[in-house]
Image: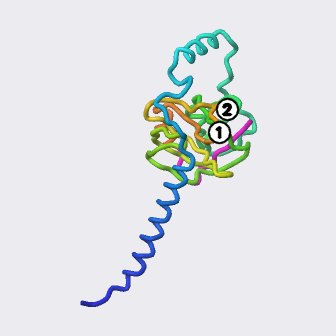
Amino acid sequence: MPRSSTGPAVAVLTAAALGVVGFLGYQAAATAPDHPTQARPGSHSAESKKKDKDDAGSKKKSTALPARSGSGVRVVYALGDKRVWLVGADGKASRTFEVGPSPASPDPGTYTVTSRNKGGVGSDGVQVEHVVVFHSEGGVVFGFSAAVDGSMPDPNARKRTGAVRESRADGTAMWEFAQVDMKVVVVP
């Protein structure tokens, strides 16, 4: 039987893929919560609903696209407003929505979408879908995602994670809009 010259290449590629999967598994285990729970504080609790009711009478934040948020097709994430805009080529937002950030936030600046993942387990131990990653720093990966159970991250958690959580509908819109190499502008 003749020897194939592709055998060594396949073996090297398989070993590299297994190494990447092993590293990602290690990273996920290292950043997973010590005691995962089903619900996050404030996600669907009476306390959260009471806060929403109390805030209803207060001054609402503007949903206008922030000034100095770049140009061209992009995702704009305003840290202070906890809001995202999906901006088309015409410079207008096709969609805007509120998000729930984790304890860690990226510095203001311009990033690009580096990877996308249809689903998995977030760094906070929650099953997520439509993961759009745009930055990594100091072991914290920053990305947009939607929790399958609808929960939001605990902003007061001790573990530093970089999840920017969206509703499932908003997560689907982000997934369809934000492709690899798309610009993500983070403003204060």
Depth order, front residue of 54/113: 54
Q: Which residue is mark 1?
A: 76
Total labels: the figure holds: 2
Residue beneath the point at 69% across and 41% down:
186
Residue positioned 53% across, 24% down in the render: 43
Q: Amino acid at mark 2?
A: Leu
Which corner quadrant holds the N terminus? bottom left
User: Residue 93 lies in what quarter of the image?
Assistant: top right
User: Label 1, label 2: how many angstroms apart (C-alpha)?
Assistant: 8 Å
The location of residue 12, given as percent across then percent down, is 45, 75
Residue at (60% x, 43% y) in the render:
89
In the image, which disc is placed on residue 35? none
Asked if the residue at tag 2 contacts the one at tag 1, i.e. Cβ–Cβ closer than 8 Å, the answer is yes
Magenta residue span = 178-188
The location of residue 161, given as percent across then percent down, is: 61, 42
Q: Is residue 38 left or right of residue 159?
A: left
Q: Which residue is mark 2?
A: 65
